[in-house]
Image: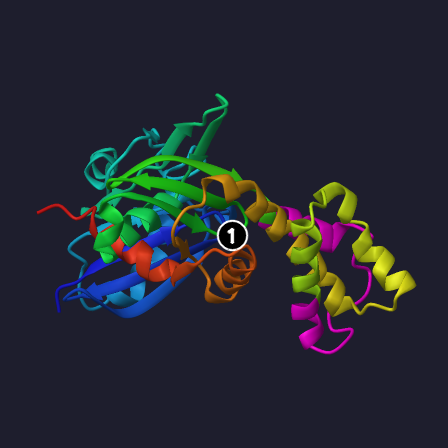
Amino acid sequence: MSYTVAGDWGTSNLRLYRIEDGAVVDRATGPGIGDLGDQTPEQVLRAALARWRATSEPRAIHLCGMVGSRNGWIEIPYVDCPADPATWAAGSARATVDRIPVTIGAGLACTRGSGAPDVMRGEETQIFGAMALVPGLASGRHLIALPGTHSKWATVEDGRVTGFQTFVTGELFALLRRHSTLTRAAADDGAPENDAVGFDAGLDRISEGGHLLGALFETRAAQLRTGASGRWALGFLSGLVIGAEIAEILPAATGTITLIGDPALADRYNRALAARGLGATVHTGEACALAGLALLETP
């Protein structure tokens, strides 16, 4: 059976999808760009594809993510905003592995109103994929959010990404959880529902006008003085950092926001947006990435 391979190759993971007649029929994984060790990207890709290639070769391979970074296979220059799907696809790079054609998507770069630069690699594929899946995003002004380690909020106007901003919310949460005194209690301390209660309390604390740096230590103080559980504390901390992120984008938020990402994390952002009176539609990162990678196919 003739097939192509689509892949999201980030810092931590390589995720490959075997595509036949437009549908995913199998998956394979491998180490991320940051975990190659002594191997080259070509060697890692060969190993990940070995099971499929044992019976037949793919027609083409389409990749996105950190594989196109300075530390990846090929460093691909960023495509400057404003950028539409065609402009982005034109900025991709070509390579081969054992004579199989490989296309690697470029990242995006922008300069915000303050003059500060910003960049993304991988998320742009999901953004353009969402635009392909939801035709309504091709006209008018829309805000697309991609929650994660480094959350991205992109503005799309008439089918072009005109700018975006990165928030290190996920990374900050992980650092505070693992390397601070704020959540010393075990994560399984307390009833499971305490996490949601704490999350809502964190959102409320920020929405009341609280500043993040001034509110963070309340996570620990609540455990010491009110007997708050570890689950509550983690939920509260999550609510604080996500709530602070949402508060910062409020001036730019109009209409329904498009959320792309892991369903569990997207649900948290959806709740945070709803608490501010904003609606959202949710799309999985995998579906959007695959739709975006399909745009790299050459006729």
Residue 215 place in picture, x, y as percent = 76, 48
The residue to which callout 1 is attached is 148
Query: Is residue 267 rendered to the left or right of residue 200?
Result: left
State the scheme by which the image is colored: rainbow
Q: Is residue 134 magenta?
A: no
The extreme left residue here reads 299
- Relative to 97, 242 lies left or right: right
Residue 261 placement, left or right of 130: right
Instruction: Indicate yes or no whether the magenta region holds residue 191.
Output: yes
Q: Quadrant of residue 204?
A: bottom right
- At label 1, the amino acid type is Gly
Q: Report whether 189 appears left or right of 200.
A: right
> Please, what secondary structure does the residue beneath circle 1 have?
loop
| Position of 111 relative to 293 (above/below) | above
Q: Is residue 194 above or below residue 117?
A: below
In depth, the one of 202 and 278 nearer the eye is 278
Residue 176 horizontal/vertical position (percent): 72, 50
Position of residue 51 measured from the top left corner of the image (x, y, whole percent): 30, 67
Q: Is residue 237 visible?
A: yes
Q: Residue at x 65, y 63 (%)?
A: 200
Task: Characterize the local packing of mark 1: few (<14), some (14-19) or many (20 or more) Cα atoms within 10 angstroms.
Answer: some
Rendered residue at 36%/38% (across/down) = 68
